[in-house]
Image (tube, rainbow, N blue to C red):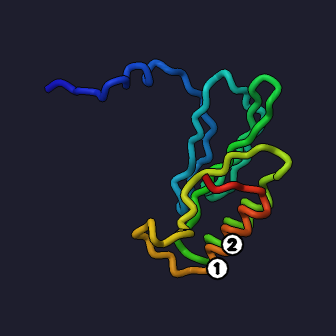
Amino acid sequence: MLLQLPSGIFGFLLMVFLSVVSPGSFLAWGFVVLYRPRYSLLNSWTDSCGRFVLTEFQDRNVIFRVACVYAPKRKPDRITIFRFVSSKIDPSFATLVCGDFNTVFDRRGSSVLDSSRESTASLLSLFRDCGVIDI
């Protein structure tokens, strides 16, 4: 039996990536941030639960950060992680914030029901505090 790979996969397999790892715990699987060697990793921070990693890169003279968040499904824990992330992101740095927030802003475009208005308010507060633009 032959294994057929999607078109273009060989080019991807030949690319070299470096990684930053946030080990998981019994609460979460953790994160891996892959990045190209052209970016210099200046620093990285993780939480102890495997739900957050913040990396700081430099490309030529530009310094930027990437924050990955995996919010818990349970409301009290989700609100706690949003507050934690808000305390770790410095708005004076350009930061890409991504991940699974487990919160829905607009129910019209989603089949997921998030009955927690507190979670939505906490996420909006995180976005406001950190100067995040939802794209």
Q: Say how many tags the image has.
A: 2
Q: Report the residue marked by disc 2.
A: 122
In the image as oriented, which residue stretches furthest toward the front? 108
Give me the residue at 67% from left, 75% from top: 121
Amino acid of disc 1:
Glu
Classify 10 Å Cα crowding around label 1: few (below 14), some (14-19), many (20 and above): some
Q: In this rendering, would 26 be left or right of 47?
A: left
Determine whether label 1 and label 2 are within 8 Å by CB. yes
Give me the residue at 48% from left, 72% from top: 107
Give percent across and percent down for residue 37.
64, 22
Q: Nearer the viewer, residue 20 or 63?
A: 63
Quarter holding residue 12: top left
Against 128, residue 37 (above or below) is: above
Q: Quadrant of the N terminus?
A: top left
In the image as oriented, which residue stretches furthest toward the left? 1
Residues at marks 1 and 2, CA–CA distance in whole angstroms: 6 Å
Against 72, residue 29 (above or below) is: above
Q: In this rendering, would 126 be left or right of 6?
A: right
Classify 10 Å Cα crowding around label 2: few (below 14), some (14-19), many (20 and above): some
Amino acid of disc 2:
Ser
Disc 1 on helix, strand or loop?
helix
Q: Report the residue marked by disc 1.
A: 118
Disc 2 on helix, strand or loop?
helix
Quarter holding residue 125: bottom right
Quarter holding residue 55: top right
